[in-house]
Amino acid sequence: MLQSEDPEVQDAEALSEDELDELLVEEVSIDGMCGVY
Amino acid sequence: MSVTEERVPEAASGFDPSRAWRVHPQIALRDESFGALAYHFGTRRLMFLKSRLLVELVSALDQYESADAAIDAVVPEDERPVYRRALARLAASEVIDVR
């Protein structure tokens, strides 16, 4: 397998399903910030 | 365990890579050094796209007749399963939708 230049992708084979889900996309809740704006 | 096409749960998320996709009209993308922030004005969800290549792929979706075609054009072959999975996640969160 060719080595990727992207370290986020390079170790993907060793990751769990959950870790794979968070590899490139991460969701952040901002519900608690409603009073800020 | 290797990352294979079979591990990508597109069907479970409703993501069909053979269809034409686009950035959802209610999404604002802001470029960042790590990739981009995606804010959905409808759901008020904030997503981190943690790869410049993923941002390039998402931004190019509307130029291709299918998500698979965009992936083939933009993403190196050995990384495609991971990026296909990322698109499925973005579809589930309504960051991208079917054209």
Image (cartoon, coloured by chain):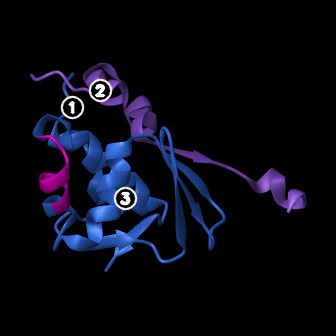
Chain colours: A purple, B blue
Q: Mark 3 packing: few (<14 Cα in 10 Å), some, or many (20+)?
A: some
Quarter of the view holding residue B30 = bottom right
* Tag 1–tag 2 contact (CB < 8 Å): yes
Q: CA distance from mark 1 to mark 2?
A: 7 Å
Instruction: Indicate the position of residue A34 as horizontal and vertical percent values.
Output: 84, 60
In the picture of the structure, the residue carrying the numbered disc 2 is: A12
Q: Where residue B13 is drawn, which disc sits there?
A: 3
The answer to whether one can see residue B12 in this image is no
Instruction: Indicate the position of residue A20 as horizontal and vertical percent values.
Output: 37, 33
Kind of residue sitting beneath label 1: Val
Q: Residue at x 77, y 55 (%)?
A: A31
Q: Disc 2: which chain?
A: A
Q: CA distance from mark 2 to mark 3?
A: 20 Å
Q: CA distance from mark 1 to mark 3?
A: 18 Å
Furthest residue in direction bottom, as rendered: B99
Q: Earlier in the sequence, mark 1 or mark 3?
A: 1
Q: Disc 3: which chain?
A: B
Q: Residue at x 13, y 62 (%)?
A: B69
Q: Which residues are magenta?
A: B70-76
Q: Mark 2 packing: few (<14 Cα in 10 Å), some, or many (20+)?
A: some
- Give the prevailing secondary structure in the magenta stretch: helix
Kind of residue sitting beneath label 3: Ser
* Tag 2–tag 3 contact (CB < 8 Å): no
Q: Disc 1: which chain?
A: B
Instruction: Indicate the position of residue B68 as horizontal and vertical percent values.
Output: 16, 59
